[in-house]
Amino acid sequence: MDWKTDIVRQLKGRKDHWNSYDEIITQYNHLLEQYIILQNQRSKLEKDVGQLRLTNAGLEKASEASQELANVNNKLSVATEEVVMHLREKGELAGEVLRLNRALVEASDKLAKEESKVQQFKDENDQLIAKIEKTEFDLNEYISINHILREEFVAAQTKLDQLQIEYNRLKPLSLELEQQLEMERRFGKQREEELLESKRVQLEMLNAEVERYNRRVEARKESVAGDNGPLSAPIGKRGSDASLNSLNRSSTASDDASNRKPTVNGLTLGGVNILSGFKRLFNPGIATNAPVDHLNRSSTFCMSASVPTGEAHRWECTDLEVYAIQFHPSGSLLATGCSDKMIYLWEISSLGMPYKNSTLYGSHGAINALDFDNEGARLLAGCSGDKAYIWSHGDNRGLKDTHTGHNGIIYTCKFISGTKLVTGSADRLIKIWDLQNRQCIQTLFAGSKCHDLVVTDATGTIISGHFDKKIRIWDAQSDKCRVELQYNAAITSLSYNAGKRQLLACLRDDTLKLIDLRQNSLLHTFTHDHFQISTDTHKAVLSPDGSYACTGSQDGSLLVWNTEDGMCEKVFVKKHTSMVTSVAWHPEGRYVASSEKHRQVILWNS
């Protein structure tokens, strides 16, 4: 701050200098006033001298008058000398004034330069202050980001340590299970060989019996060739057909017995079905739930879906709330996930009547999402207890596996293939799981809560809908987001039709949007006066052929739109007693199922 002090000191010196000028100017003005007075006195004296000269003639005779005249002359001389002296002083003062004026001009120029420098220094100071403030703001922001990253690093390190501990704990169990699996494989192979050998012996015996029977028929033909020959041939034919049909039933072959040669080589084709049947018999869990890695998801063929016409049946499936419903790929079962932590399976008859099939237990939280695998042998569920569960469906029914790794509610889950599944959670993460190794193999960092997701193609491409109003399309070969589609409200659900490459998105602003994924362009926006959304996980679904879009509303209504022209085809006003939480379309397009928050499920006829 030395330059500021120097400027203040210079300004004070300038003020003192100006004070001295003020005193000189005051004295100069005083002298001018005295000069004017003397000038006036001189003029008066000259007048007096003139008068005296006029009267001098009369006064010369008088001594007193001459003496006075001498005195006046003396006074005049003195006044003249004073005037000359004052004039001299006036000249000196005028020179001093001119010198002081020049000094004043020089001081003013110097002061202007100093003021310019002061203004420049002030501007530089303001710039430096602004730069310091910006630097401090950036520093605070970097400190905040560093703190967040440090917390995330500590959390990730802690999670890694937990996973390492879990891995160390599960590794011996995995080795033990691998040993048991190897023993089971050896046992299965041994039993398979035994069964093949037994079947081979059985087939040889049957072939031998058929040959003996044929020889007896030929012998009978030769013995009665004269009269009864034409009648014995049909009898032999029927006997041969009976033996072959018996053989066909024992081997479960698909060929007609009359077109098959009775040899071991000809019957071994049927042994494949026999072998697979024995495999299912001795290893029901493995055969039924075999993890075939087909990424493309198969579905029941649907030529054309139709608009629901009315209510087929209504029933209460729980005492609490229903959050999720899903049809079995065959369409014969309907699964409902409820807030009581249980999944209820309902068998749908040909007349649309539901019959309770079974109840699946084991979840530690409310069921938020359901999905069957391609074969319909396993059921996947995501729950509020940050876990995903897999139940086997069939003779070996029960809780098969649990996948733990999220730190929030699991809103959605889908099978990618027979060996992989994907889950989306409130912890802003999307995780891909390996079902064989029972571990997470890939984590996608979305940055926002994932409300729903779909798997679109044979490469395993994932499309996810999020709370931050974005739909993200993820690259199947990496953890990078390939495309982001921004909208005006949070995405609550997604539904995909592979045939038309169209995506139906349900948005929190009470709209449905139909998107063409070939160009990522918007085709239609569906709205209606009775369509209102009150939750972040509200579900909407496309029909199996992609011709219609269906969803429920907060007031209990069910709405159906035509995806070709965007018109609303049907509205069932307030048929539910509370808000509709989820909808599902039958794989063959025969029914639509809708669930409400308070216990009830309605099956609609199409």
Image (cartoon, grey):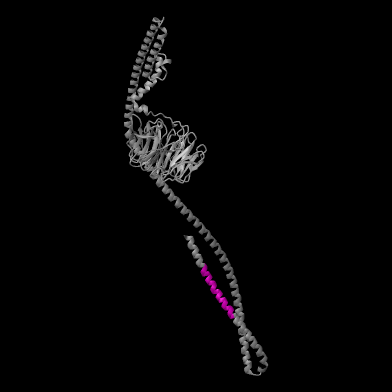
- Start-end of magenta stretch: 14-34
Q: Main secondary structure of the magenta part?
A: helix
> Is 28 covered by the magenta stretch?
yes
**Where residue 570 appears, x then y in whole percent?**
46, 41
Q: Is residue 328 left or right of residue 116?
A: left
Numbered marks: total: 0
Q: Residue at x 34, y 42 (%)?
A: 320
Q: Residue furthest front?
A: 227
Quarter where residue 338 is shown: top left
Nearer-the-camera pick, 546 or 430: 546
Q: Quadrant of the C terminus?
A: top left
Nearer-the-camera pick, 548 or 398: 548
**Where residue 50 appears, x then y in whole percent?**
66, 88
Q: Residue furthest bottom?
A: 62
In this rendering, the answer to whether 286 lies above or below 222 is: below
Q: Is residue 94 left or right of residue 142?
A: right
Q: Residue at x 48, y 53 (%)?
A: 131
**Where residue 462 appears, x then y in whole percent?**
45, 36
**Where residue 105 appears, x then y in whole percent?**
58, 67
Is residue 464 visible from the viewing direction of this image? no
In this rendering, the answer to whether 72 lies above or below 347 is: below
Quarter where residue 116 is shown: bottom right
Is residue 187 visible from the viewing direction of this image? yes
Q: Is residue 123 left or right of residue 395?
A: right
> Is 298 covered by the magenta stretch?
no
Quarter where residue 313 is shown: top left
Nearer-the-camera pick, 576 or 374: 576
